[in-house]
Amino acid sequence: MKIENPNPIQWRFAERAEQLQSSFIREILKITQRPEIISFAGGLPSPATFPVEEMKTAFDKVLSNNGKVALQYGPTDGYLPLRQWIADSLSSTGSTIAPEQVLMTSGSQQALDLLGKVLIDEGSKVLVETPSYLGALQAFSVYRPEFVSVDTDDEGLVPSSVNPVAEGARLLYALPNFQNPTGRSLSVARRVELVETCARHGLPLIEDDPYGALSYSGEPYPKMINMNPDGVIYMGSFSKVLTPGIRLGYVVAPMPLVRRLELAKQAADLHTSQLTQMVVHEVIKDGFLDRHIPSIRSLYGNQCQAMLSALEEHFPAGVTWTKPEGGMFIWVTLPKHIDAMQLLDEAIANKVAFVPGAPFYANTPDTHTLRLSFVTVPPERIREGIAILGKLIAAKM
Amino acid sequence: MKIENPNPIQWRFAERAEQLQSSFIREILKITQRPEIISFAGGLPSPATFPVEEMKTAFDKVLSNNGKVALQYGPTDGYLPLRQWIADSLSSTGSTIAPEQVLMTSGSQQALDLLGKVLIDEGSKVLVETPSYLGALQAFSVYRPEFVSVDTDDEGLVPSSVNPVAEGARLLYALPNFQNPTGRSLSVARRVELVETCARHGLPLIEDDPYGALSYSGEPYPKMINMNPDGVIYMGSFSKVLTPGIRLGYVVAPMPLVRRLELAKQAADLHTSQLTQMVVHEVIKDGFLDRHIPSIRSLYGNQCQAMLSALEEHFPAGVTWTKPEGGMFIWVTLPKHIDAMQLLDEAIANKVAFVPGAPFYANTPDTHTLRLSFVTVPPERIREGIAILGKLIAAKM
């Protein structure tokens, strides 16, 4: 019973929808998923680390013992025992985090979206690192802020460069541990300085921490939220320490903000799967992560070392790169005359892929940078791929 | 290592965050979850209908056969076999829906949020039914539209009342089958007229259909998307036919719109759990819903009948109510001098709860209306609760 000759719709989208663009990385991933390609482009954790058996057992247990509750609608803020677990794991001497401050989200990407929704008006000043995490730039862009890029160096974000731009800014977004894309970490002295600087300006500081547990030495950096629980918004995720496919993250914020975020979440998707939250709590409640995470650290640490050795061996002088102490990424800086996007075309023709650095910049991009991930590639393939890249670069020197 | 005497943050929220308010229903639910209360306030499906065993078997099977894929990041648009299943189930003679038009969402609430994000600017005209689904009003409100309430009567939305307000509107949002909150359905003749009216104006028509499968007779209404696939946006959900706790819904839209929605979803939460999508596909792919849904229809139909009989018996003359042919709700209209909010206070004191109708109106609320849900209350308790409500109302006549 189709109607006849309907007028075609002249779609009129919201202004913010004009800002939307597909993640360049997700586009590259489509090309590079072919098995013959040695891909350093991924941002995905290694599936070898997924605790499939533990998840299976936990789904069975939760559904057997508590199926009707797990499958029903749940509270917007999340499953309380899991929020309590998160609050306990974040609390440190002298700094107690309450479960009421924890809002469960559908992956930490949703926390970024909710923070943008609640804190950013069109034209609001938003401070980000140079370069910054692409997913955050995408999430915030929807709300049409004015991004201000804050300087960084080998020790991460430079706190003194926040001072001149802090006035009137709505937030500062930082990823202090083994940053995506650079692999850099903010030094301890700088953490204190940064938290003090933000507190002086009354500037909300977002501490995004998906990789903090993946320190190869096992020694974690101190968390900024514990330095000023009333001024720091902490974001965490189970994607890199358990599995990403379940989409489970969280944001921990001062009470006035977390209540707004909860209301925004209610309007956005009511709540995150109760079943998933109960299962994750079942898996982790008795110390599983303490046994599991060291195996991830060791896998990633070995592959990082393999890539660093290969870079040393195969990349010509004039190219520099970061030496991460954890996480999933190495950041390469080419000589200024080599464009990473052009290099990518040649690399793909030679069956190697990476992500050019330009999309990670909120303002002026450095076109001679690139990101390499080592976590899903075995060491011998890492050496092979880096040798090919090294030759391509050397031919341009 | 807390810093000393930080300045407190003077929170400055985005203007849209001022629109945020908690769902009145979710607030009422907190009060009415006490077991001694006979609650007709819920909007939750009956947990008696959740296929716990089937879900458990499917989780086990998917994790055993395909765990590493199910637990990894997945595509933003969703799990293709499930999108194909949805496209096939929606296609009808002469109207083929392509899987590319299907975007999987984290519950259909997320589809509402994404539609608001992509289609609504501040001040955009948005047409809604009188009354309308509260979750939609909440989701759209974030984007600060100007709501225009379109007339309804016992046959649902009145298409002729769309004409005078269609010009320049961004969308018309309708819930044509067993509407939440009224339980009313749009007559077949009106569906054709509504689709034609919207097509004439080039006005996108959202057909939200969470309850369509819950027709007590088993006879479905024709879907408006099949009358004009280029002009109708269809929203569906597994919450009412399978389980809500897994948060799985979908939106089916013309290609120019669905690509924008996909980009908005990428920025909002990357993608919906791959594991959950694979499990739901595993449960439903061989016709499970055809066997399962009749048992939900029968349960809800019986309880609806019990409530209608009790209303007939206990409610005084001067009170009217809808007679739903499916879904989960009955809508009651009191005499104009009785305020439903006041009645709720008395009802709760007498251990019965319902939802006052006012929050369901985008513009001027009818304060002498209320919504009753019968799906989670057994027939004898329905009779008991309605008798109590009837007495309270009679005392006010």
Image (spheres, coloured by chain):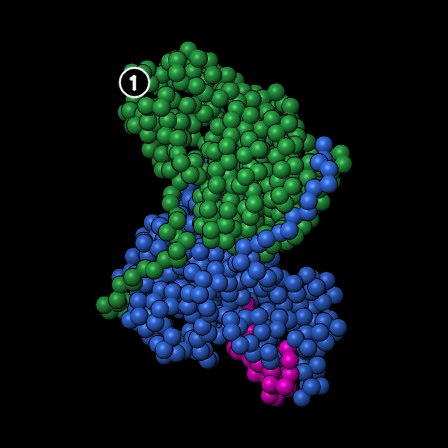
Chain colours: A blue, B green
Give the answer, above or below, for where B148 lies relative to B298: below
Q: Residue placed farthest to the top in the image?
A: B313
Quadrant of residue A189 within the rendered picture: bottom left
x, y percentage for residue A6?
70, 41
Give the answer, above or below, for where B2 lies relative to A308: above
Q: Residue at x 34, y 67 (%)?
A: A203
The residue beneath circle 1 is B396
Q: Which residues are magenta?
A: A312-340
Q: Residue at x 30, y 67 (%)?
A: A202
Look at the image and tell me in which quarter the C terminus of chain B lies: top left
Residue A52 appears in the figure: no
Q: Is residue A362 magenta?
A: no
x, y percentage for residue B85?
69, 40
Q: Is residue A326 magenta?
A: yes
- What's the amino acid at mark 1? Lys
Q: Nearer the viewer, residue B354 or B335?
A: B335
Binning the other alpha carbons within 10 Å of mark 1 as few (below 14), some (14 to 19) or many (20 upward) gives few
